[in-house]
Each structure stands twice: as C-alpha cells, then as structure tokens.
Image (cartoon, helix red, strand yellow):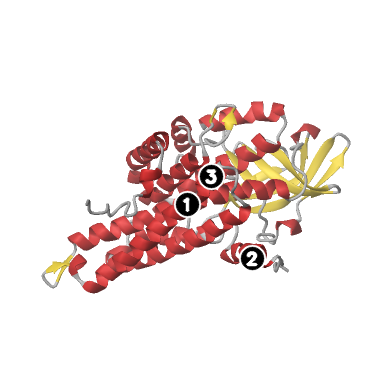
Amino acid sequence: MNTPDAHDFLAVDHDLTDEERAIRDTVRDYATAELLPHVADWFDAGTIPDPRGVAKGLGALGVFGMHLSGYGCAGTNAVSYGLACRELEAVDSGLRSFVSVQGSLAMTAIHRYGSEEQRQEWLPRMASGDALGCFGLTEPDSGSDPGSMRTRARRDGSDWILNGTKMWITNGSVADVAVVWAATDDGIRGFIVPRDTPGFSANVIHKKLSLRASITSELVLQDARLPGDALLPGAEGLRGPLSCLSEARYGIVWGAAGAARSCFTSALDYAESRTQFGRPIAGFQLTQRKLADMLIDVNHATMTALRIGRLKDEGRAHHSHISFGKLANVRAAQRVAAVARGVHGANGITLEYPVMRHMLNLESVATYEGTEEVHALTLGQVLTGTPAFR
C-alpha cells in the first residue's frame, strides 16, 4: 500500500475530473511562475504596482468570471472555479480577492441582473482583463447589516442622482466601472457607475496591516448623475447583492484551503531543514504534533470545499452550506497559519516565508463578506428556524 501524499493526504484531488485537474494545474503553474515571485514585495509595498498588467495576465488565463457563460467567459463548473481560487490564495489572499471581486461580484451582478446591453458593453472586456470592476455595498456604518445603507438614489427626470459613501472596496480606485447598491423609494437597487461619472470618486485606503497586496478604496458619490439605463433591471431588494456575495463567499471556502495549504507546506519544509540540538526539528514530538494538527485542518478544509462545490454543481447548495464552509475553512486556515508561524520561529515573522503574510491576510478574510458571527447566526437560523440577527 502506498504511503499517503503529505500534500494531499486523503487523496481529495483524486476525485477531480481530468478537466478540473488541468484547470488546477494551469492556474497553479501560472500563479507560481508569474505572481508568487512578486507578491512579498507587493505586500511590503502595500499595493499592486501594476494592477492592469496583473489583470491582463489573469484575463488571458481565463479566470475572470470563469464560472459564467457567454460574453467571453469560460463557463466552467463551480469546482473548477473553486480550484482556481485555491491556487490563487495559496499565493496570496489579495490575488484571490482581485479575481473574486471582478468575477463573482461585479461580473456576476451584471451577468445575472443586467440588461443585454449592459452585458454586451462590460462583460467581454472584464473577462479579458481589459476593464476592471468593483462592487460597492459596504459602507462606513453599514457592514454586516447592508439593509441599513445610507447611500441613496433618487429620480431626476429620466436620470438617477446618487449620494453616499462605500468603504473597503477592493479595486475601487483602479476600476473602470463600479456596481453600486443604493436605497431608492422602491427599495435597494443596483447601478452601473463608470469611473468617469461626474460626482464619482475613489480614494485609496492606506496603512492597512492585512491584504496589503491588494488595492482597497473608499467610493464617494456626490450628486453623481447617471442615465436611466444605468439601473440593473433584474435586481430588486437585498437579494441581488446578497446572491453575488454568496458567489464570492464560495470562492473564499476554497481560497482559505489554499492559504492553509501554503502555510502547512512551508512549515513542513522548514521543519525538515531546520536543525536544532543536532537534528531537524521535524524529528521532535512537539513539532510532529503541530504538523499532524495542521495536516488535519488542511485536509478537512479541502474536503469541505470540494463537497460544497459538488453540491453547487448539482444545484443543491444552500446559502447556509456556503456559510458553513466560510466559517469552518477560514477558522481552520487561521489555526494553521498561527501554528505554522510558530514552527518557523523568528523566521516566521519575515516575508521570506509566507506564513505571517497569510496570517495577517486571514484576519481580513475572516471579516469580509460575512463575519464569523454572521455565518454562525446563519447556521443557527437554519438549525432552529429562528433568526437571531437583531
């Protein structure tokens, strides 16, 4: 009987199809060759110096909106998209977020709720990376409770006038188009806001200690005037933006497994090469216990991601399944990152190794697109039938 592979201990990837393996390998090879050599410097600098160059490369790879059909999108299954997210976040959470915001948030909103004219205008360019998008839902005083948003849109003849502020918006200052959600007299609606819209501006948020290899912005709308056809006709109420968030959260389920795998792999390699007291620290009982605990978390996370992906492809994934995966996998990845940092000793706090970078990034991943508390209460509501958010 063959000894299990330390990097796929339960042979989870053996359950992938040939096409899924090919997509996994293509994204992994690209991310390792083109992104990994630079990401520590980007993290250190607190930005992506050439976001459009990165976008063009990812667009050529086909990962933007890859789970969508038509308009230049690849039309893959959910598992394939998840695998791409895993390989990107194994490099850095900021890169998975870059792809997720473009494809699962902005492009999905336009694909699912936009008019045919809006789809034709934006989706092909976004799929290729020629145009960047962002998603404006969160506000300074409205995070976990998006229904309390203060951004307003009012009619002015055939136009719309938008006023408000959106916060923590990935890609906001480099986006060519923003999908902005605003309260109207008829409920919450979505709007396509091109970057050159008068009254619209985006300001970069600096001094972040997490997701530093990412561009995060504040969107400001001051009497921003939009034509009537800027409205997303198919989205009414919170169901529209929340359904897009569910798509992005699904990517996090896989992405967190990638971050955990990266930390575990680094810790295993380091333990086998780091010598203390005359032998590699991998030979000490306490280190082996740490490696075993990390191994279990990484494989549980991967199994969870694949199972939810299969449910999604079968049309049987409930939003609570994705909450389960986001809560469980991010928590597991945080445990792995913390233990891996300890295995690396003082070296673990440097950018020479990925663990502290992942550890810091996961603090943001645990918060955005639904905090741990929100996902726990989502599961609690499904279990008891009683909502406890208020």
The location of residue 42, given as percent across then percent down, is 41, 49
Earlier residue among tags 2 and 1: 1
Of 102 and 20, which appears nearest the observer? 20
Of 89 and 162, which appears nearest the observer? 89
Badge 1 density bin: few <14, some 14–19, many ≥20, Cα 10 Å: many
Badge 2 density bin: few <14, some 14–19, many ≥20, Cα 10 Å: few
* Residue under the image location 22 percent in, 52 percent down: 1
Three-letter amino acid code at the position of disc 1: Ala
Of 351 and 4, which appears nearest the observer? 4
Residue sticking out furthest to the front:
1
Mark 1 or 3, closer to the camera: 1
Q: In this figure, which residue is indicated by the disc labeled 1?
A: 305
Q: Is residue 254 above or below residue 121?
A: below
Q: In this figure, which residue is indicated by the disc labeled 3?
A: 100
The location of residue 33, given as percent across then percent down, is 32, 39
The location of residue 96, given as percent across then percent down, is 47, 46
| Mark pair 2, 1: CA separation | 21 Å
